């Protein structure tokens, strides 16, 4: 049935649509009924049109349909929006890694801030007292972490490396990537040729890339034992570039370093404004955009307006990206309590604190979806709180935050919907939304990163 429907859609001629707005994913929003060519049976039905911008009249091909809405791709545009630009990458439209390259970068940022404002209004009827300018960095060559699919295609006699195609499990055939750090993005073809030459090329499903200030690490996943000749070819390539090389024959616990077997699995990045240097494993979570990360940490610390000797709680702390700068700011008489669900990341944070000579920060492992009020680290109050949760937000911890008595709270978010939901809960607990703004961590995509400052109302 699904196959017949797709065949029918492929045979259907493109239809005209007037684009009214952008969806939260960055697709144009239109409705049936605006054109005489439209089917009256579909009057009012929503159509999400990829590659279309508000105000444009487009001819679009419907590619998916269901009861509530349809999806289409814009084929032609008769009146281009003033915000329309030429994509920076030749693979845009096929590769699913980016969705907004046809929209000017300034307009991308404005769209993301509008989305954040709409979510605040929808979930809690909230408006920040101040909208702050967006945090921005490089528009290309910025992404330091990625998992790239790999597939050898016998019919073509070569290997594909890259992200999935839009609406497809197939890999896009990339020759370069403009958003990946250029050390990788400009070497896609070289990596493709390298993997094609391996004897087990058909048994390599993915590679992972991690980049620090001091180098590149590549992790090669392989489904069968890798012959020594293949290992030697990979080693020669990585040593010429000074890259770290890791092999992964099974789960993540099988990852091992090949270029220097006895060396630690570590890369590094610095936050020079705070005089701290972080060590991380290529498998660790780190922010993909180094330029935005530096600004983000600086802004979060500044917004908390910390004084020497204050106590700060950092929830979902990871390897200490915020914790160590916070410890620097409160000084030796202050204290930072950093909490994270992953024991391995807690160990990494402690390692980084020790390496940076910081004794005023302690890391604790705790499942933050469960009651932690009885934990010793939670027994004392805090002057300030910082929360940097995953996409699901921090709803489970909201009920505990008022108990700490903190007057200032910074919430760093990668999902405006869960931030807005949690902001509504904070408002009910007497916190006022003072500032908010977006961070363009993932330029050319619909991902919205943001930060909000809350202060406890006096009274």
Image: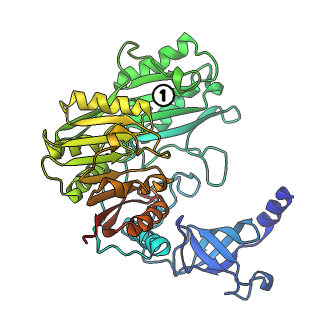
Q: Residues within 10 Å of mark 1 (few under 14, many from 20)?
A: many
**Residue 318 in sight from this viewpoint:** no
Q: Which residue does the image show at 34% across and 38% down from the upper left?
A: 376
Residue 37 image offset from top left, x and y in percent? 74, 84
* Residue toward you, 100 or 446: 446
**Residue 89 in sight from this viewpoint:** yes
Is residue 19 rendered to the left or right of residue 103?
right
Q: Quadrant of residue 161?
A: top right
* Residue toward you, 59 or 330: 330
Residue 230 image offset from top left, x and y in percent? 54, 16
Q: Secondary structure at mark 1?
A: strand
Residue 349 image offset from top left, x and y in percent? 32, 33
* Residue toward you, 57 or 302: 302
Q: Quadrant of residue 17?
A: bottom right
Q: Quadrant of the N terminus?
A: bottom right
Residue 235 vertical position relative to residue 128 in the rendered view, above or below: above
Residue 110 image offset from top left, x and y in percent? 39, 71
Q: Which residue is mark 1?
A: 219
Residue 380 vertical position relative to residue 70 in the rendered view, above or below: above
Is residue 150 rendered to the left or right of residue 351?
right
Please name the colour scheme applied to the rendered image.
rainbow
Q: Which residue does the image show at 31% across and 57% down from the upper left?
A: 410
Q: Which residue does the image show at 42% across and 18% down from the upper left?
A: 236
How many marks are shown on the rendered structure? 1
């Amino acid at each position: 049935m699904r196959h017949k429907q797709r065949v029918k859609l492929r045979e259907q001629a493109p239809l005209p649509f007037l684009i009214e707005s952008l969806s939260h994913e960055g697709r144009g929003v239109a409705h049936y009924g605006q054109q005489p060519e439209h089917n009256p049976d579909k009057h009012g039905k929503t159509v999400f049109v990829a590659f279309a911008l508000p105000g444009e009249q487009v001819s679009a091909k419907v590619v998916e349909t269901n009861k509530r809405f349809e999806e289409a791709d814009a084929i032609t545009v008769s009146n281009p929006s003033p915000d329309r630009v030429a994509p920076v990458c030749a693979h845009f439209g096929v590769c699913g890694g980016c969705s907004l390259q046809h929209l000017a970068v300034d307009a991308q940022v404005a769209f993301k801030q509008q989305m954040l404002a709409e979510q605040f209004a929808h979930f809690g009827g909230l408006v920040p007292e101040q909208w702050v300018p967006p945090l921005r960095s490089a528009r290309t060559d910025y992404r330091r972490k990625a998992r790239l699919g790999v597939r050898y295609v016998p019919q073509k006699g070569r290997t594909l490396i890259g992200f999935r195609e839009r609406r497809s499990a197939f890999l896009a055939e990339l020759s370069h990537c403009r958003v990946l750090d250029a050390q990788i993005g400009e070497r896609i073809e070289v990596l493709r040729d390298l993997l094609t030459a391996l004897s087990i090329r058909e048994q390599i499903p993915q590679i992972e890339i991690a980049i620090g200030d001091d180098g590149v690490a590549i992790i090669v996943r392989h489904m069968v034992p890798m012959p020594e000749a293949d290992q030697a070819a990979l080693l020669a390539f990585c040593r010429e570039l000074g890259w770290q090389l890791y092999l992964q024959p099974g789960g993540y616990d099988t990852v091992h370093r090949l270029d220097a077997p006895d060396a630690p699995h570590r890369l590094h990045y610095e936050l020079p404004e705070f005089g701290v240097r972080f060590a991380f494993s290529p498998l660790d979570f780190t922010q993909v955009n180094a330029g935005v990360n530096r600004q983000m940490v600086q802004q979060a610390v500044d917004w908390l307006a910390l004084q020497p000797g204050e106590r700060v709680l950092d929830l979902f702390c990871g390897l200490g990206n915020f914790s160590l700068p916070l410890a620097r700011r409160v000084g030796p008489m202050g204290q930072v309590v950093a909490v994270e669900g992953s024991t391995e990341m807690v160990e990494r944070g402690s390692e980084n604190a020790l390496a940076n000579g910081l004794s005023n920060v302690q890391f604790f492992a705790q499942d933050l979806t469960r009651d932690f009020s009885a934990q010793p680290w939670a027994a004392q109050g805090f002057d300030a709180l910082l929360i940097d949760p995953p996409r699901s937000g921090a709803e489970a911890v909201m009920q505990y935050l008022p108990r700490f008595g903190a007057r200032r709270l910074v919430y760093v978010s990668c999902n405006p919907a869960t931030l807005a939901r949690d902001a509504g809960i904070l408002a009910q607990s007497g916190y006022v939304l003072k500032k908010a703004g977006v961070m363009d961590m993932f330029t050319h995509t619909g991902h919205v990163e943001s930060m909000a400052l809350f202060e406890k109302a006096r009274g």
